Image: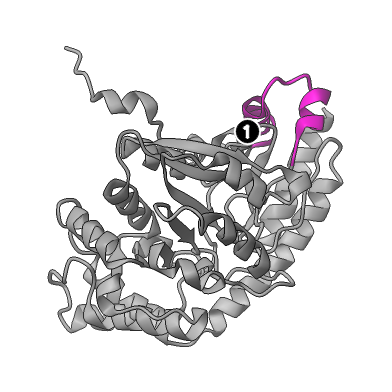
Amino acid sequence: MSLSVSKRMAAIQASPTGAVLALATELRAAGRDIISLGTGEPDFDTPQHIKDAAQQAINDGATKYTPIDGTAELKSAIQQKFSAENSLSYDISQIIVSSGAKQCLFNLCIGLLGPGDEAVIPAPHWVSYPDMVRLAGAEPVIVAAGIEADFKITPAQLRTAISDKTRLVILNSPGNPTGASYSKSELQALGTVLADHPNIVIAADDIYEHIQWGSNPFCSFAAACPGLFDRTVTINGVSKAYAMTGWRIGYCAGPIELITAMKTIQSQSTSNPCSISQVAAVAALSGDQSPVVEMTTAYKHRQDFVVAALNDIDGFECRSGEGTFYAFPRVTGAMKHRMLTSDTDLVALLLNDADVACVPGTAFGAPGYLRLSFACSMEMLDEAINRIKRALMA
């Protein structure tokens, strides 16, 4: 017996990064010595004071349902974080806590978009943005910016991409998969274009805010463009900066109408985020921030090594990023040398011949590139680079 699924699934694919993680896990179980550079998973443990808070919460019996949009304590900590770090003032009612920043983004797309709408997405982009838009019944409009443009779109490109159907623009800075970060002046230039389109909502995905080391300090879109504050949704979470990927806590703040819609959607899907994780997130946001600095310093050291090592491989071109824990080299030269027709073929070669897993640029809307995560030890990175070199020289 064959069962059919909904028509919308014809346009949706499973997360490519999740697929890489699953394949690497499967191959390891089969006895292969796979080095996985495919997943954005910090190798650091969650800081001890955060784990202590969670253990205390369990002992105190904080194991019941919470309000759908998050506890008052966590929402207050988020409110204070936005004020202190981003100079953004939100009422508690404008804040929602979800099971990861991904759920915040998904709730936003479902709550805002519908058939006939469009969402502008700069590429290279995080793999899930276009499919979230499609699941909402809308169409993604991809705007490409390659390595020569430092992976950042221009105001002219944004202006050209906007139509009378555009309802959403997604900006991710520092960006996954490139590590590129928009400066305050660059955000303001994009904001000048968006100021002429009052029906467009801006989603500022700031999840890598604290993993940044560029010469320009981090600036959130709503802070750079206060005139667009009333139609900007600022999204963040604890997963990356605090090495809390498995705790599944994301949050966002924005216009009350959208936040209310997102709360309604959440009430009919996951309901409240994990109660224990919410207590841990309060400790993360309100407690000692020195572990974040230490982890970011290590990521910068790894990036410097990886970028130099990749640029030493024939056919690779890699730009230094301003943040995140990803390198995104252009590999068209290596593809040509090995007579490969796609970046997917190169990923398969590296997996089969080098036991190194990474993600093709095609998954991020950028064919001819690879994404490699350096959220692992220097020893593992050194071995992975050596394996890639040997495989491509064979």
Q: Which residue: 61% across, 65% down?
A: 188
Residue extent of the magenta highlight: 330-355
* Place of residue 199 in the rendered image (x, y in percent of width and height, measured from the top left): 39, 52
Residue 254 or 350: which is nearer the viewer? 254
* Place of residue 84 in the rendered image (x, y in percent of width and height, measured from the top left): 47, 86
Question: Does the segment drawn in magenta span residue 349?
Answer: yes
Q: Quadrant of the C terminus?
A: top right
Q: Which residue: 69% across, 71% down?
A: 213
* Place of residue 292 in the rendered image (x, y in percent of width and height, measured from the top left): 55, 77
Q: Is residue 358 visible?
A: no
Q: Which residue: 51% across, 39% down?
A: 24
Q: Is residue 39 visible?
A: yes
Q: Under tag 1, what secondary structure?
A: helix
**Is 141 situated left or right of 321 in this image?**
left
Residue 190 or 322: which is nearer the viewer? 190
Residue holding disc 1: 351
